[in-house]
C-alpha cells in the first residue's frame, strides 16, 4: 500500500512530462485556423492614410488579396516589411493592411520610415476585427480569394521561403 502512495506522484509527473514534451515540439505558427475555407469576416473600418472614408471587405470582393495584420509597436513586423515592400512593387497581388491596436500617428510615422506596401490600410484601434479574424498576435497574414474565402493564414513574420513557396503559388492558382 505504501508503494502505491509513492507511485502516484511519479505517474502524475510522467504524464505531465509527456504532455510538456509533446507541446514543446509543436510549432506555434502551425495553429490551425477554423476560418480556412470559410468566408472572411466582414469589416468596415476607417482608413489610416485618408482622413475620411471607410474600407471594408466588400470593397475587395472579386479580387485575390492579402490581409497583413501589423502594428508600429510590433518588432516582428519589421522583419517581414521589406518583403511586402518588394511584393508591392511587383503588383502581383493587392496588399491590404490591418493596423492593429495602434496609435494612428505612430502607424503613419512607421510607414514614413519603413515604406508603405499597402494599397489601403484599415484601422482596428480596439482589436475587435482582429478577434473576428482569429488573430493571435501580430504579424499575421491571410490570403483571400475572389469570393471572399480565406485560403491561407500565416502566423508570425512572413519570410522569403513562405512567400515564394506558399503564398505566391497560392495567389497565382487563385488568380487563374
Image (cartoon, rainbow, N blue to C red):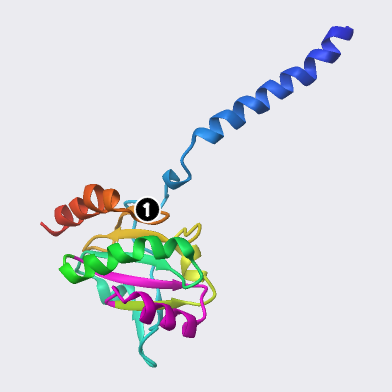
The number of numbered badges drawn on the structure is 1
Residue 148: x and y in percent read: 28, 63
Horizontal arrangement in the rendering, residue 72 relative to residue 168 (left or right): right
33 or 121, which is in the foreground?
A: 121
Residue 135: x and y in percent read: 47, 60
Name which residue lies at 23% across and 66% down.
Answer: 86
Locate the N terminus and report the quarter of the image it occupies. top right
Q: Is residue 95 magenta?
A: yes
Residue at the extreme right of the image, as rendered: 2
The residue where tag 1 is placed is 154
Name which residue lies at 83% across and 14% down.
Answer: 6
Residue at the extreme bottom of the image, as rendered: 51
Residue 61: x and y in percent read: 24, 70
Against 173, residue 59 (above or below) is: below
Question: Mark 1 packing: few (<14 Cα in 10 Å), some, or many (20+)?
Answer: many
Locate the C terminus and report the quarter of the image it occupies. bottom left
Q: Quadrant location of residue 70?
A: bottom left
Residue 37: x and y in percent read: 31, 51
Residue at the extreme left of the image, as rendered: 176
Q: Is residue 127 magenta?
A: no
Against 112, residue 162 (above or below) is: above
Against 90, residue 168 (above or below) is: above
132 or 66, which is in the foreground?
A: 66
134 or 155, which is in the foreground?
A: 155
Q: Quadrant location of residue 68?
A: bottom left
SS of the residue under disc 1: strand
Against 11, residue 89 (above or below) is: below
Segment colored magenta = 93-119
Name which residue lies at 16% across and 65% down.
Answer: 92
Name which residue lies at 28% across and 61% down.
Answer: 144
Amino acid at each position: 500500500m505504501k508503494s502505491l502512495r509513492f507511485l502516484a506522484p511519479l505517474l502524475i509527473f510522467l504524464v505531465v512530462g509527456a504532455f510538456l514534451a509533446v507541446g514543446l515540439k509543436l510549432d506555434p505558427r502551425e495553429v490551425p485556423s477554423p476560418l480556412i475555407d470559410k468566408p472572411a469576416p466582414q469589416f468596415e473600418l476607417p482608413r489610416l492614410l485618408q482622413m475620411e472614408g471607410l474600407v471594408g471587405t466588400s470593397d475587395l470582393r472579386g479580387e485575390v488579396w492579402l490581409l497583413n495584420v501589423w502594428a508600429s509597436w510590433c518588432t516582428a513586423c519589421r522583419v517581414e516589411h521589406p518583403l511586402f515592400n518588394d511584393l508591392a512593387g511587383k503588383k502581383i497581388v493587392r496588399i491590404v493592411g490591418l493596423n492593429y491596436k495602434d496609435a494612428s500617428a505612430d502607424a503613419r510615422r512607421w510607414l514614413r520610415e519603413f515604406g508603405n506596401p499597402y494599397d489601403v490600410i484599415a484601422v482596428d484601434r480596439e482589436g475587435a476585427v482582429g478577434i473576428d479574424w482569429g488573430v493571435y498576435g501580430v504579424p499575421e497574414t491571410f490570403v483571400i480569394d475572389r469570393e471572399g474565402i480565406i485560403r491561407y493564414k500565416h502566423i508570425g513574420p512572413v519570410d522569403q521561403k513562405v512567400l515564394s513557396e506558399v503564398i505566391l503559388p497560392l495567389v497565382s492558382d487563385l488568380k487563374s
